Every structure is written in C-alpha cells, then in structure tokens.
Amino acid sequence: MVIVEMPDRRLLAIQSLDAQEDDTLMDELLATNPQFQELVGKSKRSARKPFFAGDEQQ
C-alpha cells in the first residue's frame, strides 16, 4: 500500500488488487461509457510530467 499526501493535505491510499481477483470495472467502463472513453483518450494524448521521488525534486 502507498499513502500519498494530496496538495490540499488529504491522504490517499493506493492498494494493489489481489492477482486472483478479477476486477472488470475498467473493462466495463471502457466498453460502455463514452465519457470514460473520452477521459482515457484525453489522458493518452496529454504530455507526461516527470515523477521525482523524495529528495530527487529539482
């Protein structure tokens, strides 16, 4: 699990799914939700910002 502090000081926990669990939500959203499909497409087209960990920030 990874805990991330957001700019507004909230904490966000990110946890991986169990490899044995079949999570179909993403597949369902991609297949049936045009708004979600548009967001994914927009994300793919956008520029990526470099990620710096801890003391690596410039």
Image (spheres, rainbow, N blue to C red):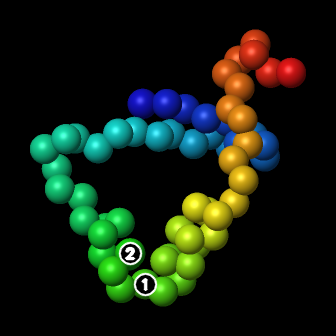
Please tell me the numbered disc located at residue 33: 1
Query: Mark 1 falls on what kind of element?
Result: loop
Q: Amino acid at mark 1?
A: Asn
Which image quarter is the C terminus in?
Answer: top right
Residue 25 figure quarter: bottom left
Q: Residue at x 75, y 16 (%)?
A: 56
Residue 57: x and y, percent?
80, 21
- Circle 2: residue type: Leu
Report which quarter residue 3 is drawn in: top right
Q: Residue furthest top?
A: 55
**How many numbered badges does the structure rendering display?**
2
Quarter of the figure with the N terminus: top left
Residue found at x 63% / y 70%: 42
Residue under the image location 13 percent in, 44 percent down: 20
Q: Are marks 1 and 2 in contact (CB under 8 Å)?
A: yes
Q: On the image, numbered disc 2 is attached to which residue?
A: 30
